[in-house]
Amino acid sequence: MPLTYWCEQAWLPDGVAAGVLVEVEGARIVGVRRGEPGGAHRLPGLTIPGLANAHSHAFHRALRGVTQGGKGDFWTWRDQMYEVAARLDPDAYLALARAVYAEMALAGITSVGEFHYLHHGPGGTPYIDPNTMGHALVQAAREAGLRIALIDACYVAGGPGRALAGAQLRFGDGDADGWAVRAEELAAAYEGQPDVEIGAAIHSVRAVPPEQMPVVVEFSHRHAAPLHAHVSEQRAENAACVETYAATPVQVLHEQGALGPRSTAVHATHLSEVDVELLGQSGTHVCMCPTTERDLADGIGPARRVYDRGAPVTLGSDSHAVVDLFEEARAVELDERLATERRGHWSAAELLGAATAAGHASLGFPEAGLLVPGAWADLVTVGLDSVRTAGAGGLEAVVFAATAADVRSVISAGRRVVSDGRHELGDVGAMLADAIGRVR
């Protein structure tokens, strides 16, 4: 029996409309039309499609408020991240990820791309099931009400010519062939389950030698699965890559066949003009993570240039300095204003498209991110009466003024996950405090 929701306002493919009835049957939308509310469930505010967090490292959430003090850079932050990675076990990871994903649901996120490289036990010893940590992430997402693209990362080196050491030993499978054996088992475990997509990742050019990258690319082709990679996040990364391979990270990935419409270059902060062309002409997604990039002092990526050359732009919260896709979206525009001293690079619709349809597509969920019949029934309603949004109107009020705290209701794949700003699991703040306390 279909459920009908009446949206006071809704963002449809042709713009914002008032008085929209959305019929939902199971996990899908079966009808969208204008009409009076009648006996439908009312959603006051502006209803948009569910948001897609295209790049997440769930365990990094434990670093919020810890790494922000003092000085340093990405590399000093990474040392602190490794300390947390060394302390996690499957039970602690499940508790932490469940709380983090519930925080995402409260922020209107209905799909998460979890860039997963914390595979094994201390010292790199595999668990009895070598995908135990991955299964914990899937369970956490399901309990929190999110679809998950588990982007399983190949990570076999500590840098060009350097072996894994310390906490990194937990990330590796020996070589790309060893990674592929484990990844195939993971993919088989979730075959035919529509709420889980098993993707692949080349962690970075420093972590996967070029000659091993084709194994990961082949996995992506064989499963028609997403293929992600950290790309040019740091100038030092670029310099080491050019010194070792006489090519930029984007050029290395291009030479190994790792670019294309199913691929995503995460960060892409420091790009040459050749890099921009390669990403654009191949249709590779580019995932911007502005709150992390500014938190780590990485720099401002050329989002508009790659978008104009043909690369769809998506958004991620990455290290979870904050979990707020509205902030990520507007930061793409506001950061470009700082870099160029000009305004008006992106429209609100373009930015929200990056946070919705483009993001879901990059995670292997192309039937999400739109309020149309046949799409996943993801409805996120943002209040227009808060101190941030009152007196404003239209899509601009949501993209440029609202925060995650303004999300009132979240329906994810037909399931009411958030009502009146409260998650069905209960007190998410208490969940986070407990889970983080176990690993600090």
Image (cartoon, rainbow, N blue to C red):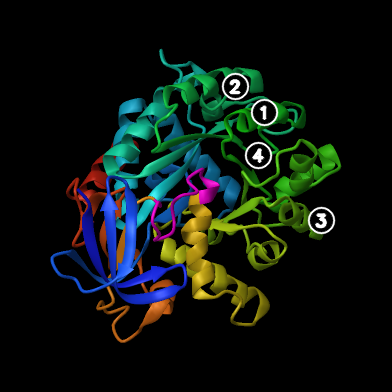
At mark 2, the secondary structure is helix
Mark linked to residue 274: 3
Asked if marks 2 and 4 touch (Cβ < 8 Å), the reply is no
User: Is tag 2's residue or tag 3's residue first in the polypeptide sequence?
Assistant: 2
Task: Report the amino acid beneath label 4.
Answer: Ser
For the C terminus, give its image quadrant: top left
Q: Name the residue rendered at 17%, 48% in the picture.
A: 426
In the displayed structure image, the side of residue 283 where residue 223 appears, left or right:
left
The residue labelled by disc 1 is 218
Task: Report the amino acid beneath label 3.
Answer: Val
Q: Name the residue rendered at 74%, 47% in the picture.
A: 250
How far apart are the alpha carbons under marks 3 and 1?
25 Å
* Badge 3 density bin: few <14, some 14–19, many ≥20, Cα 10 Å: few
The residue labelled by disc 2 is 180
User: Is tag 4's residue or tag 1's residue first in the polypeptide sequence?
Assistant: 4
How far apart are the alpha carbons under marks 2 and 1?
9 Å
Whether 23 is drawn above or below 266: the answer is below
The residue labelled by disc 4 is 204
Task: Report the amino acid beneath label 1.
Answer: Glu
* Badge 1 density bin: few <14, some 14–19, many ≥20, Cα 10 Å: some
Residue 138: percent from the left, percent from the top?
Answer: 37, 33
User: Is tag 3's residue or tag 1's residue first in the polypeptide sequence?
Assistant: 1
User: Is tag 4's residue or tag 3's residue first in the polypeptide sequence?
Assistant: 4
